[in-house]
Image (spheres, rainbow, N blue to C red):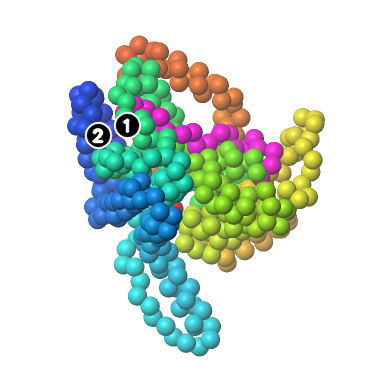
Amino acid sequence: MLFNTFSFPIFLVVAFVVYRLLQRQRMPRLLWLVMVSAFFYGCWKPWYLILVAISTLNSFLVGLGLERWQQARIRKLLLWIGVCGDLLLLGVFKYGNFATETLEAAMGTIGLSLALPKVPTELPVGISFYTFQTLSYTIDVYKRRIPATRSLLDFSVFVIFFPQLVAGPIVRAREFLPQLLERPRLDQTAIGQGISLILIGLAKKMILADTLSTTLVQPFFDNVWNKGALDTVVTLWAANFQVYCDFSGYSDVAIGAALLFGFALPKNFDRPFRSRTPMEHWRRWHISLSFWLRDYLYFPLGGSRQGEWKTAYALMMTFLLGGLWHGAGWTFVFWGLYNGVLLVLWRKWGPRPATTRFGQALEIFATFNGICFGLIFLHATSFAEAWAVCTALLRFNTPPSDLSLVGLGTLAFAAVLHATPTRWKTEIQQGFANAPSYAIGLSVVLGGGVLSLFAGMARPFFYFQF
């Protein structure tokens, strides 16, 4: 089930109404959350629930073992069982075919024909996201940062909670599990803020992201071989805003839907295109993933505490695996390597922080375009297509095509919207939450009507493929 379909609001209303009826009783309301979340996820393919159940049970039982046994050898063995169990599921279903196809191609280069078995299914939706959640739980219990939960029901809600299950934000157990112990906050303010975030998120996705994709990005990649430098630059800008509006829109809907049920999910975006360095960009973009990679990969590899070479190595490995997390393909690996190299070079030879507004604007412009160039390898389906985009950047004499005025207007609006102060969004949410009930209801009806006009361009959320 997708957030941007007509079935989702029906599902959300039913789930919310029953939850309100059960809110005073802890076990029934948590059981209801597990049931509706399983239904939500099972709408793609019911057997996907088996993978979620295996991951949930594996991490829950390992957590109990880590809590019970204090011997270092046993705890380390349990840690390996928990981590390897999760990574095995992720490896088989996300990277299995990529690994076998790479091996077949390598054997082919030396004249050997090899036909290996393939995983007979498409990538299970959201497996990268819930795997990172269960991994963080196992590691945090092992490090004694949090106690293991003794409630399988609580842990199941943590893993399968439907707003963030498919594409995040990636929630830490220490942030979410304590909220299950309290009676949910379901006052008008929380509900109003939740509804406003859902409407904002759907507008960013259906009106901005899908329009940019339909009018600028997809037409370019459908005929990249005949494009020039101006078309390419505009498309890369549009692609950057498309991914931002798409994914931050999903995060807004997820955070808003969670508020309706009394839960606070972490912020996932903070106006990343105002960043003055690539390092700042990744602190503002997909914050839950960036901080996950920082805490569970970059810091264990040494971080910035062991000299320049070790720091460069930690950055390169973090972004290499971050790129591989995004997709099972060499273009994703190269995208990760590119961003790792960009950070290493900027840290070593980047300009000193500017002190004038003009200098700061130049830093923002350089950072934005550096990130945009990397998007070539995130959007391209092959290195041949990526090379075609790179060469198109050098065709200065090729006249621009008839760029869609709707697309250009949407790009300009998205840029202006991104530049608005964060407090404006907060004030809009607060004003919406404090409005009379009839005004909120009327806004939902009008908002739904406007969004339905864009349903014909509806596309899956960009990060579902990861």
Task: Categorize mark 2 by other alpha carbons within 10 Å: few (<14), some (14-19), many (20+).
Answer: some
Which residue occupies 25% across, 48% down?
42
Given residues 138 and 389, the one toward you in this image is 138
Q: Which residue lies furthest to the bottom in this view?
A: 111
Q: Which mark is residue 30?
A: 2
Query: Residue at (39%, 57%) from the top-left corner?
Result: 74
Q: Give the range drawn in magenta.
A: 255-278
Q: Is residue 437 left or right of residue 220?
A: left
Look at the image and say whether residue 4 sits in the magenta stretch. Answer: no
Label 1 belongs to which residue? 180
Along the polypeptide, which appears first: circle 1 or circle 2?
Answer: 2
Residue 342 lies, with reference to residue 417, above or below; the image says below
Query: Could you say where residue 323 lies in the image, as x and y percent from the top left?
Result: 54, 56
Element under disc 2: helix
**Image coords of residue 446 (percent x, y):** 36, 23
Whether residue 261 is in magenta: the answer is yes
Q: What residue type is labelled 1?
A: Leu
Contact (Cβ within 8 Å) of mark 1 with mark 2: yes
Q: What's the distance in space between the residues labelled 1 and 2, CA to CA?
A: 8 Å
Does dot 1 land on a helix, a strand or a loop? helix
